[in-house]
Image (tube, helix red, strand yellow):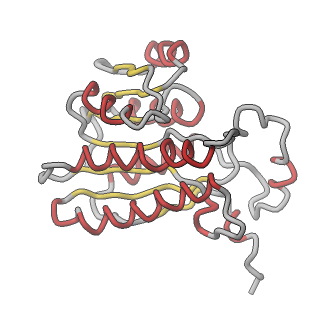
Amino acid sequence: MNLAGQRILVTGGARRIGAVIAKCLAGRGAVLLIHCHTAAAAGGELLAELPGAGHRLLAGYDFADPEAADRLYDAAGPVDLLVNNASAYRLTGADAAGRYDRINYLAPLTLMRRYCAGRTGGGAIVNVLDQEVLHPEPPVSDYLASRLKLLESTLEFALSRAADGIRVNAVAPGPMIPPVGLEHSRMLRTLATVPLGRRVEPDDLADAVAFLLSNDSITGAVLPVDCGQRLSGVRPG
C-alpha cells in the first residue's frame, strides 16, 4: 500500500513517539489526524512542521472517559488507516487498574471496532504495545495486563477481519524515551542488559509502523523493535 494521500489517525500523536510516527507518515505523503488529550500546544507546533497539507489536530479527548474514543472517531471524519499509540504508563490512585484498562485497552479496542465496522475494501491498523507483552513475567502489573489484552485483541481482529482485507498488526518497542516523570529512572541500568547495548531509536520504531501499514501481506504480526531486549533471558547457543 502506498501511504501517499491516506488519512491516518494517530492517537497520542502530538508529542514523544507519537509525534515521531506522525512526522514519518507525513514524510511518506500521508494526511495526519493527530489525537491528543492535553498536548494541544505541542500538537499545534507539530502541525506547523509536517510536510504536506490537510493535517488536523484533534485535541481534548481523554481516553479515561469511556465515551472519548467514540467521540474522537466521529470528529476525525474518514479514516483510511489507524495507529493506536496513546497509552498510560504511570498511574496511581484507587482506580488505576480501571484507567489503565480504559486508556490502554478499551479506547483502542473501540477505535478498532469503529474502524472495521462496515469496511470491506481493505485497510490496516497498527497497535503500539510494549516488548514486555512478548515475555510477561509474574506478577503482571495492571499496566502490563492492559497491554496483554490489547495484544490478544490485535490477534483476534487480524484473524476475524482478514476476509475483509483488513490487516491488524502491532509493534512491541523496547527502551526508548523514558516516561514523563521517570527521566532519571533505571533506563541506563536496563540498557546494560539489552543485547545491542543501546536504546531504540524513535525513528526506527516509526519506520516499523510505516512498514506494517504499507506491507499488504502482513497481518497478525507483533514486530519487536527492542534492540533484542526480549532475548535477555535466552541462553546463547
Give 24 or 17, whichever is nearer the viewer: 17
Number of dots carrying numbers? 0
Q: Residue at x 56, y 27 (%)?
A: 15
Snapshot quadrant of residue 57:
top left
Give 237 or 55, whichever is nearer the viewer: 55
Which residue ends up furthest to the front in the rendered image? 94
x, y percent for residue 215: 32, 56
**Quadrant containing the C terminus in the rendered view:** bottom right
Q: Residue at x 71, y 32 (%)?
A: 180
Tell me if 201 is positioned left or right of 33 in this view. Answer: right
Tell me if 86 is positioned left or right of 120 in this view. Answer: right
Q: Residue at x 26, y 44 (%)?
A: 2
x, y percent for residue 221: 42, 65
Tell me if 82 is positioned left or right of 86 in this view. Answer: left
x, y percent for residue 48: 45, 12
Give 123 or 77, whichever is nearer the viewer: 77
Q: Residue at x 29, y 51 (%)?
A: 124
Q: Is residue 41 above or below residue 168?
A: above
Give 54 or 94, whichever is nearer the viewer: 94
Q: Is residue 214 above or below residue 74?
A: below
Snapshot quadrant of residue 169:
bottom left
x, y percent for residue 80: 24, 40
